[in-house]
């Protein structure tokens, strides 16, 4: 997973334009609105909303934007009524497995855009369950090692029931069961650790090793999918090697 964290850091550095930040805020607002619509506006009782709001805050989304999104979801603002969530599955180049979480107000548009993106790369859509069995949904946190030494993070992970704590150098990753998100989040907050990433992720049970060029072709498809308006998150089973990360940084 450390390759994922480093790739995310590279993308953040290269994608810090106002236009891309606006697109990120749009996606986060949709996620907040959907969570509020399904579970109400109380973050203490609505776990999904708390998760969405924490993700929005981690991206420095303004408080007013978050509050407006919650009102859309609860019906105080009428704009959020037509949204729905979709999780779609597909195969990318070289047998890679890809899962896509979407929030959309037009299912047909979303399916058409994703089908085109997969087909253009030589991949294809898959039936529900055909790809998903290769992933587990897990709690995922990534935070700077400057905020907590790895040894302390490891001890905290053992205490809160994390499955794994990974030392990525500048970044520490903590992975745990999906239902442990709240306790891990609360425990990090108590020791003043602010994650750069926090959420429920689909994590591959087994990663696929490809050479650098083949890995880059899969990552190109993933970045194309991520740019689609209705896409919230993309998960994959590719191992991202140090050689691939070096090529990405040099691009």
Image (cartoon, rainbow, N blue to C red):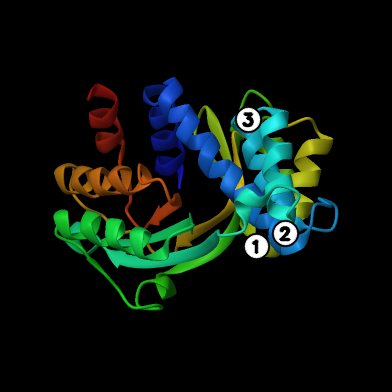
Residue 40 percent location from the top left of the image: 79, 58
Where is mark 3, residue-wise?
A: 61
In terms of depth relative to the viewer, which is nearer, 186 or 81? Answer: 81
Residue 45 position by quadrant: bottom right
User: Cα distance, mark 3 to mark 1?
Assistant: 27 Å
Q: Secondary structure at mark 3?
A: loop
> What whole-number distance in Å separates the C-alpha atoms at marks 3 and 2?
25 Å
Q: Are marks 3 and 2 in contact (CB under 8 Å)?
A: no
Q: Visible in this render: residue 155? A: yes
**What residue sits 41% from the left and 78% below the top?**
129
Q: Quadrant of the C terminus?
A: top left
Front-most of residues 29 and 155: 29
Return the x and y of residue 222 as percentages of the image width and height: 31, 48
Which residue is under mark 1?
Answer: 177
Q: Which mark is residue 132?
A: none
Residue where numbered disc 2 is placed: 180
Of 124 and 248, which appears nearest the observer?
124
**Does label 3 or label 2 sit earlier along the sequence?**
3
Do callouts 2 and 1 mark residues in contact (Cβ within 8 Å)? yes
């Amino acid at each position: 997973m450390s390759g994922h964290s480093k790739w995310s850091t590279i993308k953040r550095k290269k994608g810090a334009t106002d236009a891309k930040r606006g697109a990120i805020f749009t996606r986060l607002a949709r996620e907040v609105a959907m969570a509020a619509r399904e579970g109400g506006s109380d973050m203490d009782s609505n776990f999904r909303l708390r998760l969405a709001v924490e993700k929005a805050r981690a991206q420095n989304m303004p408080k007013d934007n978050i509050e407006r999104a919650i009102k859309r979801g609860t019906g105080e603002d009428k704009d959020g009524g037509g949204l729905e969530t979709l999780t779609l599955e597909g195969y990318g180049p070289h047998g890679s497995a890809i899962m896509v979480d979407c929030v959309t107000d037009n299912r047909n548009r979303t399916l058409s855009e994703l089908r085109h993106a997969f087909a253009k790369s030589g991949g294809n859509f898959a039936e529900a369950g055909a790809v998903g069995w290769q992933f587990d949904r897990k709690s995922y946190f990534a935070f700077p090692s400057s905020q907590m030494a790895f040894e302390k993070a490891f001890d905290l992970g053992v205490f809160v029931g994390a499955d794994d704590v990974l030392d990525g150098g500048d970044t520490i990753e903590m992975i745990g069961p999906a239902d442990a998100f709240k306790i891990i989040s609360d425990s990090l907050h108590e020791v003043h650790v602010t994650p750069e990433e926090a959420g429920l992720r689909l994590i591959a049970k087994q990663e696929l090793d490809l050479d650098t060029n083949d890995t880059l072709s899969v990552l190109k498809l993933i970045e194309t999918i991520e740019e689609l308006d209705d896409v919230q998150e993309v998960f994959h089973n590719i191992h991202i090697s140090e050689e691939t990360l070096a090529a990405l940084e040099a691009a």
